[in-house]
């Protein structure tokens, strides 16, 4: 079964999410931005969600984590919780 590891930053607005993504693309550290800005408890761990399998996260999250490029920041991704930046750190089939 496929497995992945990812970290994310969760915020309320698409605008805020896009602003943080731009800061990361310009050199800001993902983990530091997660600690400072994420509204998810995982922010305290730099956004680290650990390892999970398909179906453990919401559908919109899974679609990114199990299909898109590894080691790249994706988003904004809208879910019922808000807007996410997602970095897939590892994936195996």
Image (spheres, grey):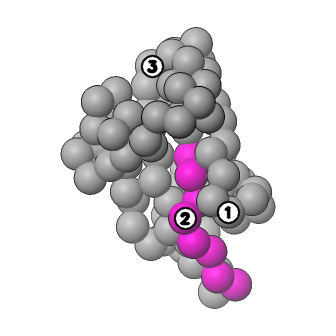
Q: Is residue 81 above or below residue 1?
A: above
Q: Is residue 90 magenta?
A: yes
Q: Determine the secondary structure under disc 3.
A: loop
The residue identified by callout 3 is 12
Q: Picture quarter containing residue 93?
A: bottom right
Tag 2 near tag 1, CB within 8 Å: yes
Camera-side residue: 92 or 62? Answer: 92
Give the Cα distance between marks 1 and 3: 25 Å
Give the Cα distance between marks 3 and 2: 23 Å
Q: Is residue 12 above or below residue 86?
A: above
Q: Is residue 5 above or below residue 27?
A: below
Camera-side residue: 21 or 41? Answer: 21
Q: Earlier in the sequence, mark 3 or mark 2?
A: 3
Q: Earlier in the sequence, mark 2 or mark 1?
A: 1
Q: Position of residue 43 (x, y in %)?
A: 30, 42
Circle 2 packing at 10 Å, graded few (<14), some (14-19), many (20+), is: some
Give the quadrant of the N terminus. Answer: bottom right
Tag 1 near tag 3, CB within 8 Å: no
Q: Which residues are magenta?
A: 86-93
The residue positioned 62% from the left and 74% from the top of the image is: 91
The residue positioned 67% from the left and 63% from the top of the image is: 70
Q: Which mark is residue 89?
A: 2
Circle 1 packing at 10 Å, graded few (<14), some (14-19), many (20+), is: some
Q: Position of residue 25 (x, y in %)?
A: 61, 34
The answer to whether any part of residue 24 appears in the image is yes
The residue identified by callout 1 is 70
Q: How many marks?
A: 3
Circle 3 packing at 10 Å, graded few (<14), some (14-19), many (20+), is: some
Residue extending farthest to the front is 27
Q: Is residue 85 magenta?
A: no
Q: Determine the secondary structure under disc 2.
A: strand
């Amino acid at each position: 079964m496929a497995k992945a590891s990812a970290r994310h930053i969760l915020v309320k607005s698409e605008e805020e999410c896009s602003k943080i993504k731009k800061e990361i693309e310009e050199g800001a550290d993902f983990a530091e931005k997660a600690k400072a800005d994420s509204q998810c408890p995982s922010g305290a761990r730099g956004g680290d969600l650990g390892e999970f399998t398909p179906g453990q996260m919401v559908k919109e999250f899974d679609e990114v984590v199990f299909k898109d490029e590894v080691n790249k920041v994706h988003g904004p991704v809208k879910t019922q919780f808000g807007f996410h930046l997602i970095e897939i750190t590892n994936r195996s089939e």
